[in-house]
């Protein structure tokens, strides 16, 4: 069976119902291999023969992407992504299995030079718990959407039986793209989300020694964007390496200064646990910097939990901003 093909945004958004869709997508797949990634927004079309049930677009929204590493009970880690969201819900052909949908998208994304963040086939990781938690209840990031043409019952079948999951990332000169595919074992459902993030808003791109220098000189502090932790833990993920490297360079260039490393959380859950977690994460950042040669005497860890929010805790986007680590200039050493 033929899998999904790469297509430009205009075709993806407007021409899903075209009778010539197969020919167009095959042609654009060939074009996509020779056009610079700086000149094309890479989106993913439906598996051939699928029926589109409905769509959802948001100019700016939040999507929690599941990623490696897997934690306890094979539960994936999480990464919050903010950007322009394009989402479609499809019904796969009768003869096509969920695994075939999943595998076909993986091959197509790899061919387009996406980095696979999580390849979660049924039973290889805990999709049942993770998909329901993030996209059903309580966060309802998919269930709460108003899809044109898809009712809540259909979304419930998609999320509650979402047993195959795929996430991927691709960076171009102007933007970073995230793709998320959920394949359900029920009602032949699957969904494809594409998030477009402008690189100026992507922490791992903008965080640099020069940026830290400017922010601390002007504000006395800087949010350490691009540092990611395993969910509910103080374990820094490998995706944080570019940010840790930039912070290390900045501190080496300012070795006569002293700083507080301050951990923050949102206001979800137990207060004491949040205070403890925020301090442990601050300590984890300092330990990572010490391993790269930064003197322990240059940094002091402090956790303030939810006491100093950067945004409201009444929205998912606000909570995402509140979960952060900051570097604060310290005027006096003990």
Image (tube, helix red, strand yellow):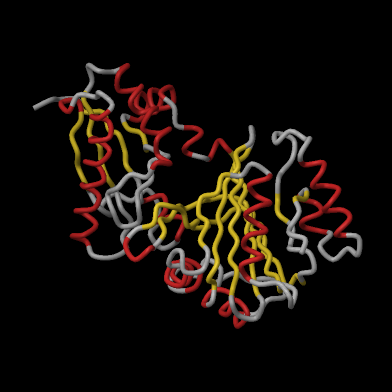
Residue 5 horizontal/vertical position (percent): 76, 54
Disc count in the image?
Answer: 0
| Residue 224 higher or lower than 166, as above or below | above
Res. 173 image quadrant:
top right
Q: Quadrant of the N terminus?
A: bottom right
196 lies left or right of 50: left
Viewer-closest of 113 and 37: 113
Task: Identify which residue is drawn at 77% across, 72% down.
Answer: 51
Rendered location of residue 126, percent (x, y): 43, 67
Query: Extreme bottom residue here?
Result: 153
Q: Quadrant of the C terminus?
A: top left
- Write the residue at 45% across / 60% down: 316
- Residue 251 rendering spot, x and y as whole percentages: 30, 23
In this view of the protein, which residue sits in the foreground, 203 or 5?
5
Residue 331 position within the rendered picture, expressed as x and y whole percent measured from the top left: 19, 25
* Relative height, residue 189 to residue 68 (above, below): below
Residue drawn at (52%, 56%) of the image: 119
Q: Height in image: 292 above or below 234?
A: above
Front-lying residue, 292 or 196 = 292
Splitting the image into 4 quarters, where does residue 250 fall?
top left
Q: Residue at x 40, y 52 (%)?
A: 69
Residue furthest left in the image: 334
Check the image and report above or below for 292 versus 65. above
């Amino acid at each position: 069976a033929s899998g999904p093909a790469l297509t430009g945004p205009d075709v993806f958004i407007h021409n899903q119902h075209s009778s010539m869709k197969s020919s167009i997508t095959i042609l654009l797949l060939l074009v996509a291999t020779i056009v610079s990634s700086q000149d094309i927004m890479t989106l993913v079309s439906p598996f051939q023969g699928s029926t589109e049930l409905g769509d959802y677009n948001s100019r700016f929204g939040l999507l929690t992407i599941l990623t490696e590493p897997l934690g306890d009970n094979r539960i994936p880690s999480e990464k919050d992504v903010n950007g322009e969201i394009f989402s479609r819900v499809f019904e796969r052909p009768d003869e096509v299995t969920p695994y075939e949908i999943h595998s076909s998208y993986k091959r197509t994304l790899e061919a387009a030079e996406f980095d696979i963040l999580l390849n979660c086939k049924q039973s290889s990781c805990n999709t049942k718990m993770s998909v329901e938690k993030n996209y059903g209840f309580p966060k309802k990031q998919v269930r709460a959407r108003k899809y044109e043409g898809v009712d809540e019952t259909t979304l419930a079948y998609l999320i509650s039986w979402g047993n195959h999951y795929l996430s991927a990332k691709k960076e171009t000169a102007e933007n970073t793209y995230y793709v998320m595919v959920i394949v359900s074992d029920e009602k032949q459902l699957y969904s494809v989300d594409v998030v477009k993030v402008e690189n100026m808003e992507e922490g791992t791109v903008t965080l640099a020694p020069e940026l830290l220098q400017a922010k601390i000189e002007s504000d006395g502090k800087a949010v350490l964007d691009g540092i990611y932790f395993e969910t509910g833990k103080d374990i820094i993920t490998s995706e944080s390496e570019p940010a840790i490297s930039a912070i290390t360079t900045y501190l080496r260039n300012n070795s006569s200064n002293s700083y507080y490393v301050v951990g923050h959380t949102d206001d979800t859950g137990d207060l004491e646990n949040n205070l403890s977690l925020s301090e442990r994460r601050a300590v984890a950042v300092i330990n990572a910097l010490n391993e790269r040669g930064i003197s322990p005497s240059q940094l002091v860890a402090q956790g303030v939990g939810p006491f100093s929010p950067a945004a409201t805790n009444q929205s998912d986007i606000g909570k995402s901003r509140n979960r952060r680590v900051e570097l604060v200039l310290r005027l006096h050493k003990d």
